[in-house]
Amino acid sequence: MSDATLHASAHNPDDFVVQIADQVESFLVAVTEVARGDEPESAVPFLLLEVSQLLLAGGRLGAHEDIVPDDRYEPDPGPEPDVDELRENFARLLDPIDVYSEVFDPYEPRKAPVPARLSDDLADIITDLRHGMAHYRAGRTTEALWWWQFSYFSNWGPTASAALRALQSVLIHVRLNQPLEELDGLDTDQADVGDDTLEFEAGRVMAEEIGGPLGIRPGA
């Protein structure tokens, strides 16, 4: 389907590209609002909800047949908006639980967990989604779908999945009154950080000490 055909139906709420764009735009607006830090007590549950909903759009893109752009080379969408302020805001807002450990590829055997940051994840996801949104707003809807699908497989999909697991884990630790290891001072740029390092370098704190600043109440 050509860009012209898709763009002509852009006001049809049943159209695939419109639905994906709406989900992307909803995520961008919502998480940008969370980053302002006006309601820190609801940040983690709200981010869990928004990332979950975004991954629904990702699942639809992943299940869709390959989307092929009309042009051989991607049109220039213009300068990428700076996300450093958002990244820093998320880092401050999520400071007690920003660093977490992630297995990069569960199908590669004997791979040690690597350190990651929720603030970096959210900033990277936003960058990818904004890139596609620039195409969509310029009327290049096939290009937008291609980019969102391609970057879902190559970056924002795995990143969002990892962030979702981390956010879910925080709520599990807090709601079930389970101790939580805080990765305090762990350098996420270290390439040789393994499972043992993550375990012994992390400082042990109680779940309520993590949940308290974020307004998450432990279960009974």
Image (cartoon, rainbow, N blue to C red):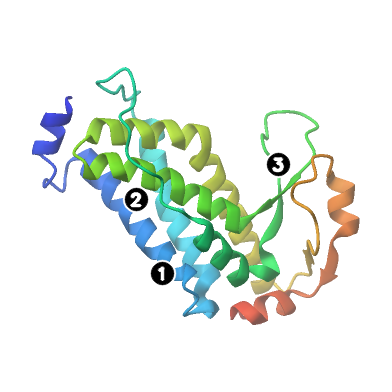
Residue drawn at the location 66% of the way across and 81% of the way down: 212
Residue sticking out furthest to the left:
8
Label 2: which residue?
A: 24
Disc 1 and disc 2: Cα gap in Å? 14 Å
Give the number of the mark in front: 3 or 2: 2
Q: Inspect the image, locate mark 1, and give the three-letter code of the amino acid beneath it.
A: Glu
Query: Quadrant where the N terminus lies?
Result: top left
Query: Quadrant where the C terminus lies?
Result: bottom right
**Is residue 8 shown above or below 187?**
above
Residue drawn at the location 12% of the way across and 30% of the way down: 4
Task: Point out which mark residue 33 bears.
Answer: 1
Residue sticking out furthest to the front:
79
Label 3: which residue?
A: 103
Give the number of the mark in front: 1 or 2: 1
Neighbour class for label 2 at 10 Å: few (<14), some, many (≥20)? many
Q: Inspect the image, locate mark 3, and give the three-letter code of the amino acid beneath it.
A: Val
**Is residue 72 shown above or below 182?**
above
